[in-house]
Image: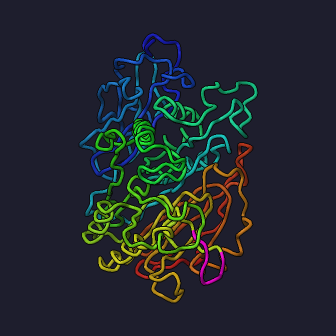
Amino acid sequence: MTPQSSTENPFTLGVASGDPLPDSVVLWTRLAPCPHEPGNGLPREGAIPVDWELARDEHFRRVVRCGTAQARAEDSHTLHVDPRGLDPDSVYWYRFRTGPWISPAGRTRTAPEPHATVASMRFGMLSCQQYDEGYYTALRHLADEDLDAVFFLGDYIYENAIDAQAGVRNYTDQPLPDFYNHWLIDLDDFRQRYALGKTDPDLQAAHAAHPWYVTWDDHEVENNYAGDISQGNLPPEQFRARRAAAYRAYWENMPLRRAQRPSGADLRLHRRFQYGRLAQFDILDTRQYRSDQAYGDGWKYPGPESENPARTLTGAEQERWLLDGWRESTATWNVVAQQVVFSQRKNTTAARSKVSMDAWDGYPASRARVLAGVEQAGIENLVVLTGDVHVNYAMDIKKDFNAPDSRTLGVELVGTSVSSGFDGDDRPDDWSGMLAANPHMKFYNGRRGYVIVTLDAERLRADFRTVSGVVVPGAPVTTAASFVSPAGAPGFRPA
């Protein structure tokens, strides 16, 4: 079967764009006439030609680039088109065609030239979309926002088994195939989980509306894995095989360039982007190169094992890359897009309190080296973007978190989940305790949603956008809180 002869639409998974440069942006799609079947109803070998167009207008009357690409079976019939020679800081529309079928149109934009003066930038940040724990309502609202880009900070899929009813989505009229009802292990498993997620119309809308910068966290492979070490203590060679399958499926399904195509169980995901003189974006990978979590993971008291100066969350090469990039940066804002909570989070007001061994608190020497690099490079406006924990935080990054009056070196925005954790709550059970234990924490909210960040020469503004629930579709979106941090004087205050 091929799309040319099939009576089924092959563009069931939508379109996407990402990693914009001043002269290029990646255009993505995946052919899947039967998205719930292994192989998606397409041959296991060969390639299918797909035409693509890039236009100045949504009606495609002014096409500026076009071509034909091969959707290869070895890449799960995905395309990663990388048109060059585009104009900087410009909006484009794109679409794909094979046989009689035309994909939905997507809207994207290129980045400004590195030395351009940019008045402002507005982007969304989001993470953690567990398919069976809620609808992607937040993504529908995100699609309607006026944004230059989106940062996705990990847990695009989850590795858990999904029953025929798709959990709270309650698919009773058309239950899911039994294929989904096991934990992900091999390449077909991971490919099908991405296909399932991408059938969601709200996710398709959010991808079609904005270019995305993406990074992963743990659930794209296995919960809380660390480098080559699995949480379930699989033999290293067995876990690396699973990691290789997961990394391959990740690259196939994200709008990433061929430079990110994995080699076995290795994929270089950390990368850097400039947005004129306004911002430098450093996208990190805090999973692939990290030391194993101390004391068996979880919330534990810090001690000699976690405080060992040899421990690393980023790996030595990525750490050098980050600090070298800061020394060369001339941007007003230096933004780090990454996965796990950077700032200290104690769970009591006691002098010695448990912290998360999976976050930067479990790797204090690694965090100290990064903060020393901030000061050595003279970075005045550090912004850390974080996902992972399914709640919203606004936090000041302190030189010494145990000394609340110490210098504020930057700010951290932790964004809640899209759907993971079900509906959530405005004030989780530990709300008052966490705020009391962490004076640098200025905001804490547990609803689902996303964050809108606006940067200009004078300040950062963060709007925490939340929905009332996700176990039933269609909830409205509201702004739970807004904060600003002035340029040159970091620290959050209510807007």
In which quadrant of the rendered image does the C terminus lie?
Answer: bottom right
Which stretch did the figure color magenta? 348-355
The answer to which quarter of the image holds residue 367 is bottom left
Which residue corresponds to the image point at 40% horizontal and 30% vertical from the top-left?
Answer: 78
Instruction: Using the rendered image of the protein, determine whether residue 52 is visible from the camera's viewpoint.
Output: yes
152 relative to 403, above or below: above
258 part of magenta stretch: no
Name the residue nearer the viewer: 346 or 410. 346
Query: Residue 245 placed where, x, y %?
Result: 43, 36
The x and y percentages for residue 453 are 50, 63
Tell me if I can see residue 220 in this picture: no
Residue lying at 54% horizontally and 86% vertically, measured from the top left: 404
Q: Is residue 441 above or below residue 224?
A: below
Residue at point 28%, 38% (across, down) = 83
Extreme residue in the front direction: 235
Residue 460: image x %, image y %?
47, 71
